[in-house]
């Protein structure tokens, strides 16, 4: 590897290659750091930090730039990468990032929302920009002591007229404020960048070129402002025609939008000499108007792709901007003196006064165009004039132009960097408080009433669903009080806590509906002792036809307790290929069902991986038995857990081993339930596709019989798990019930959103809360109910044999048997046929199987296997006894 690296460096120039590598290293760190910041904001701070994400990334980059600027020696690649970025060519940033940001804002905008605001946006981005430039240039001429000419001041004003309200727009969308206000600010920013850039280019050419004739100014402005949009509309029409001819080509359509954005931007700017920004904005808006030129199956994927790319670009550009701002402020300290900071603060105030003047002047025309904003919304409109990347890029372009004198360049860079920092930090962080203080984080009274009724609808339907679930005996062991955490009331409360709203309080006043009424309206169903007594401890089975047990429409725990089928395979290899193919089809059905169970929240991701892996291995061997055996392998205790269990005399170790054993049993229950749940799908296949049996009925019956046999084996194991690990079973069923409830709530809230009854902001917040709770259920077990002393019940208390004894006698037996407790892995042979028996086993948990004369006999809790042979004359076992299915916990009895 070293030889290759050195060869590459030597062949291409070591210095350039090293510089590129260090930049990539630093940018990789920057992207990961940005993702970490976003994770901390959402997961730890719960989005309660006032500063928007982009501002935090900017501050992060600014801090790195300040720190690195005071390090005298650049002796590692990280510092060298930062040093390269501070000297990056501004034109590179301009051509790499600007096309992405502009086209995304235009193309992914909701045209039907921004359409009524086009006139207002043009007023603010056209004449409004001229007013802002006039105010700033007047301030620069008469207040600054730099003796700037009007031309230099106008160019300075044009740079500061380019707004970047990305932080405010994101906040308005998040807070649920007026969509019209957010749309106007966003659209104005797009057009604003174009008009400000046009004026900047015109006056920069005049300053560096020396020609300031009125004719040239008018011609250049006309060329930029008319030529750019005209070229954009032509490209937009061509793009719509092209995409209408392409159908469901995912890669082609998505990649084409990126290529088109860069191509149009370059051709407009370099080849035609018109405004590339305006061309791209117009093309993007035209495509947004005709958004259905993109194929239906590509729409969502394209939206997600652009969102990810823009997030990536925003992290990079704000990190780079922060670094450039830091070095620019420090790099201009030779020219800048103390009163320049005062000038920047005054300039910050003047900028807002100029924006306020624009809003006031055009207020009548905006109302005439149909925009009806309150004074509060107009105040947010004034406050949203942030300056960001666009202004910094233009300032860097001036700073890199040596035809302008050095002091002017440094003062441009200093003041523009200061204004960008002040607006992003002050306006960006305070906008959240301003929106809430003005009460704009709520909708109109009419929309609030619809919201409350939609949530009430969701609450009642969820309560009805919960009521139906309580009627089903499969959920008889659920702790219903633990489900309070997953009801709509709790979701709305958590949404209020994050957004600092009072929706839950108003919802509780809506009616006298009691969310707990349905939790107590139905008595807690449980399996009565008489039902369990019907299940024999020893179950003798023979080869029984597959249709012996009719399927009940409402299966319950009682129906799980059925005789086990002994599958006796035929050794003949008739039509082996059909048997293998049919087995693989059944295994494929298993796989599909497992994935659906995971989607419904019935199993965790870890369980899904285990099941899919076992199915794939079984398909290679064409064996249902292998699939079941691989599942059973996961019932085995790990060496670490077996070691801990041996030291159960120490309380701390006992507690830890019980927790690990609880998790292990939890996984076992989940695996067996998932396998058993496939029974419904298999029965459906047999009922709906009887034609498959016509190929070879004998093979068909054997495969179906084998499938049914393993499902019945799983049924018997489930019954034992339910009786032996009551708390673990209860928590698992509660978790499963909670997941089903969350899936139902997710479906309900999606329906409310799709019917227009629920706004996008509330829908997003509640959906996110549901997703977080689902993930928590998937990766963490449901908390153990309060008052529970131990997660795994003591083995001695499970045996009714000792419960009727006096207390002293019972305690004596407990001390004796404590040292006799043992755990045995699945398929462990306990006694061999015709072998001398020296030990008998009192079963506590698990199942022991014995085959006598080809008839399987199953022993369960309370039975003692080998006791007859232990006290017989010859001490010989009459059969082979082994652990069937899951784990076995037993007391060892010797002679």
Image (cartoon, rainbow, N blue to C red):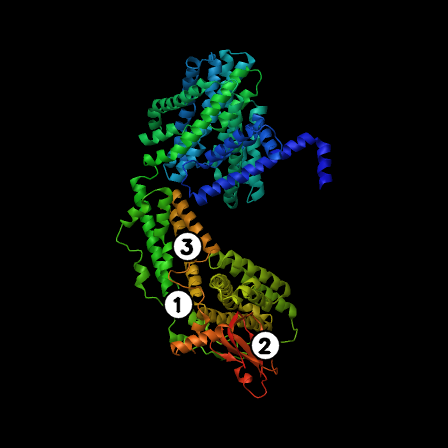
Q: Position of residue 326 (x, y in %)?
A: 51, 27
Q: Are marks 1 and 3 in contact (CB under 8 Å)?
A: no
Q: Which mark is residue 276?
A: none
Cα–Cα span, label 2 and label 1? 33 Å
Q: Looking at the image, is 792 positioned above or below residue 145?
A: below
Q: CA distance from mark 2 to mark 3?
A: 43 Å
Count the marks: how many? 3
Outermost residue on the bottom side: it is 873
Where is 784 relative to 811, above or below? above
Q: Nearer the viewer, residue 332 or 618?
A: 332
Q: Nearer the viewer, mark 2 or mark 1?
A: 1
Q: What distance separates the C-alpha of mark 1 from that of mark 3?
A: 20 Å
Neighbour class for label 1 at 10 Å: few (<14), some, many (≥20)? some
Mark identifier at residue 568: 2
Q: Earlier in the sequence, mark 2 or mark 1?
A: 1
- Residue name at image x 60 percent, y 33 percent: 23
Mark 1 sits on what residue?
473
Q: Which residue is tagged 3?
A: 742
Q: Nearer the viewer, residue 437 or 304?
A: 437
Q: Nearer the viewer, residue 165 or 699?
A: 165
What x and y, as percent, mark residue 690?
A: 53, 69
Other residues around mark 2 within 10 Å, as few (<14) / some (14–19) / many (≥20):
few
Residue 114 located left or right of residue 453: right
Q: Earlier in the sequence, mark 1 or mark 3?
A: 1
Q: Which one is earlier in the sequence, the residue at label 2 or at label 3?
A: 2
Residue 534 occupies which quadrant of the picture?
Answer: bottom left
Q: Would you identify the image quadrant in which residue 476 lies?
A: bottom left
Q: Is residue 173 visible?
A: yes
**Dot 3 alpha-carbon crowd within 10 angstroms: few under 14, some 14 to 19, many 20 or more:** many
Q: In the rendering, at what x and y percent does residue 715 appear?
A: 49, 70
């Amino acid at each position: 590897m070293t030889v290759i690296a050195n060869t590459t460096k030597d062949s291409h120039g070591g210095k350039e290659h090293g510089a590129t590598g260090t930049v990539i290293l630093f940018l990789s760190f920057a992207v990961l750091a940005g993702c970490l910041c976003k994770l901390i904001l959402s997961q730890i701070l719960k989005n309660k930090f006032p500063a928007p994400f982009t501002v935090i990334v900017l501050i992060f980059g600014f801090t790195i730039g300040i720190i690195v600027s005071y390090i005298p020696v650049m002796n590692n690649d990280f510092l060298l990468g930062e040093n390269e970025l501070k000297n990056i060519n501004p034109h590179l940033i301009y051509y790499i990032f600007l096309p992405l940001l502009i086209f995304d804002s235009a193309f992914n905008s909701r045209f039907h929302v921004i359409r009524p605001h086009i006139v207002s946006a043009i007023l603010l981005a056209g004449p409004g920009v001229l007013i802002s430039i006039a105010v700033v240039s007047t301030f620069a001429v008469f207040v600054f002591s730099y003796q700037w000419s009007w031309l230099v001041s106008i160019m300075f004003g044009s740079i500061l007229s380019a707004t970047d309200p990305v932080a405010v727009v994101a906040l308005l969308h998040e807070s649920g404020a007026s969509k019209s206000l957010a749309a106007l600010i966003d659209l104005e920013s797009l057009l604003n960048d174009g008009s400000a850039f046009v004026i900047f280019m015109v006056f920069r050419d005049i300053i560096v070129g020396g020609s300031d004739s009125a004719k040239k100014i008018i011609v250049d402005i006309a060329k930029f402002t008319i030529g750019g949009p005209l070229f954009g509309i032509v490209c937009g029409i061509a793009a719509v025609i092209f995409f209408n001819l392409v159908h469901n080509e995912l890669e082609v359509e998505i990649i084409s939008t990126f290529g088109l954005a860069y191509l149009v931007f370059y051709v407009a700017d370099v080849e035609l000499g018109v405004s590339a920004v305006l061309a791209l904005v117009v093309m993007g808006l035209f495509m947004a108007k005709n958004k259905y030129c993109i194929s239906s199956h590509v729409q969502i994927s394209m939206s997600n792709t652009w969102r990810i790319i823009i997030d990536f670009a925003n992290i990079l550009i704000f990190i780079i901007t922060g670094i450039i701002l830091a070095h620019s402020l420090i790099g201009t300290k030779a020219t800048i003196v103390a009163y320049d900071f005062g000038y920047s603060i005054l300039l910050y105030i003047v900028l807002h006064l100029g924006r306020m003047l624009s809003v006031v002047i055009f207020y009548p025309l905006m109302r005439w165009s149909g925009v009806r904003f309150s004074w509060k919304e107009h105040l947010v409109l004034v406050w949203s004039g942030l300056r960001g990347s666009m202004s910094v890029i233009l300032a860097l372009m001036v700073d890199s132009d040596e035809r302008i004198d050095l002091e002017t360049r440094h003062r441009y860079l200093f003041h523009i960097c200061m204004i960008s920092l002040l607006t992003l930090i002050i306006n960006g962080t305070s906008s959240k408080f301003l929106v809430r203080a003005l009460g704009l984080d709520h909708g109109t009274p009419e929309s609030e009433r619809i919201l409350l009724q939609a949530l009430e609808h969701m609450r009642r339907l969820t309560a009805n669903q919960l009521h139906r679930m309580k009627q089903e005996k499969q959920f008889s062991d659920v702790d219903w009080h633990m489900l309070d955490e997953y009801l709509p009331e709790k979701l709305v409360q958590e949404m209020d806590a994050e957004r600092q709203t009072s929706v839950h309080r108003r919802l509780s006043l809506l009616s006298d509906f009691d969310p707990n009424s349905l939790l107590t309206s139905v008595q807690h169903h449980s399996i009565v002792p008489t039902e369990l007594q019907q299940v024999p401890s020893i179950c003798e089975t023979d080869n029984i036809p597959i249709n012996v047990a009719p399927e009940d429409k409402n299966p319950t725990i009682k129906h799980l307790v059925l005789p086990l089928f002994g599958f006796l395979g035929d050794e003949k290899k008739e039509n082996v290929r059909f048997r293998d193919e049919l087995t693989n089809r059944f295994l494929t059905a298993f796989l599909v069902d497992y994935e659906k169970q995971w989607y419904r929240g019935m199993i965790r991701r870890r369980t899904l991986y285990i099941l899919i892996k076992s199915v794939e291995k079984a398909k290679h061997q064409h064996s249902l038995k292998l699939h079941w055996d691989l599942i059973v392998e996961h019932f085995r205790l790990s060496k670490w857990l077996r070691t801990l269990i041996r030291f159960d005399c120490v309380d701390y170790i006992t507690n830890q081993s019980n927790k690990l054993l609880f998790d292990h049993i939890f996984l076992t229950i989940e695996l067996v339930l998932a396998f058993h749940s496939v029974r419904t799908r298999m029965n459906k296949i047999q009922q709906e596709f009887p034609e498959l049996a016509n190929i070879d009925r004998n093979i068909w019956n054997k495969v179906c019989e084998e499938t049914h046999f393993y499902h019945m084996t799983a049924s018997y194991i489930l019954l034992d798990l339910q009786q032996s690990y009551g708390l673990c079973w209860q928590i698992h069923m509660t978790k499963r019930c909670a997941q089903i409830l969350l899936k139902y709530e997710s479906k309900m809230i999606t329906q409310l959103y799709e019917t227009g009854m629920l706004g996008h902001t509330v829908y997003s917040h509640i959906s996110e809360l549901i997703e977080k709770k689902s993930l928590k259920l998937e990766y963490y077990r449901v908390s153990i109910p309060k008052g529970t002393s131990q997660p795994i019940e003591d083995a001695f208390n499970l045996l009714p044999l000792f419960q009727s004894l006096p207390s002293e006698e019972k305690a004596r037996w407990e001390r004796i048997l404590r040292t006799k407790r043992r755990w045995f892995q699945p398929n462990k042979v306990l006694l061999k046929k015709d072998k001398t028996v020296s030990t008998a086993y009192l079963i506590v948990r698990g199942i022991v199987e014995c085959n006598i004369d080809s008839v399987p006999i199953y022993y369960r809790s309370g039975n003692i296997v080998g006791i007859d042979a232990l006290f017989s004359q010859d001490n010989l076992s009459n059969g082979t006894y082994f652990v069937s299915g899951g784990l076995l916990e037993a007391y060892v009895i010797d002679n």
